Image: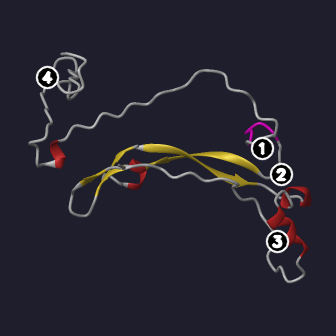
Amino acid sequence: MTRCPKSNLGIILEVTPPGEHAAIVTSGNNSNDDALVPVLEIRIQDDRKSRMRRTIPFDCDENAKETRCCRSPLIVNFDDFGWDWVVAPRQYEAFYCNGECPYVFQTSTLNAHIVSQSKTAKVPLCCAPKKMSPLSMIYYNHDLELRYPS
């Protein structure tokens, strides 16, 4: 196979479980069936040490007796919900906020400070995430068509 982009149109990956025969699945421009398109999920773990942030992330520690607001880990596994229509990722690491919010935490943003000063505020401020990120998924829709982010 050459490295020329005009003639190098793919990757060949052969995986054979012990004691079984190899199955060959090919994909190309002639394939009209999305269900036959192979999917290769690759996870890359970066082991490089990154610079530590100067702010304390307030990740919860199971052994600590911390009562202030902190971030607790939560693994969401789609198999546990019976969501077989999700192809990838099968699970992801989500987080949830837990703990009390002392006044100094409540006013960490300008909006939180303004709301805390309001005399009409009926509900006290509580622990909430500062940032959320989207999750890209490969899944089957209601018509059993494979969908993936483009």
- Where in the figure is residue 77, as x and y percent of width and height? 45, 47
Callout 3, which amino acid? Pro
Sequence-first disc among 4 and 2: 4
Residue picked out by circle 1 = 58
Q: Quadrant of residue 115?
A: bottom right
Sequence-first disc among 4 and 3: 4
Seen from the viewer's position, the closer of residues 12 and 128 is 12
User: Label 3's element?
Assistant: loop
Is 116 left or right of 82, judged from the image as shown?
right
Sequence-first disc among 3 and 1: 1
Spatial CA distance of label 4 from label 3 is 61 Å
Sequence-first disc among 4 and 1: 4
Q: How many marks?
A: 4
Q: Are dots 4 and 3 in contact, CB under 8 Å? A: no
- Where in the figure is residue 30, as x and y percent of width and height? 8, 42
Spatial CA distance of label 3 from label 1 is 20 Å
Callout 2, which amino acid? Arg
Spatial CA distance of label 4 from label 1 is 49 Å
Is 123 left or right of 87, judged from the image as shown?
right
Residue picked out by circle 2 = 68
Residue picked out by circle 4 = 22
- Where in the figure is residue 52, as x and y percent of width and height? 75, 30
Callout 1, which amino acid? Phe
Report the residue that reaches farthest toward the left: 30
Spatial CA distance of label 3 from label 2 is 15 Å
Q: Main secondary structure of the magenta part?
A: loop
Q: Residues within 10 Å of mark 1 (few under 14, many from 20)?
A: few
Residue picked out by circle 3 = 124
Seen from the viewer's position, the closer of residues 76 and 137 is 137
Q: Residues within 10 Å of mark 3 (few under 14, many from 20)?
A: few
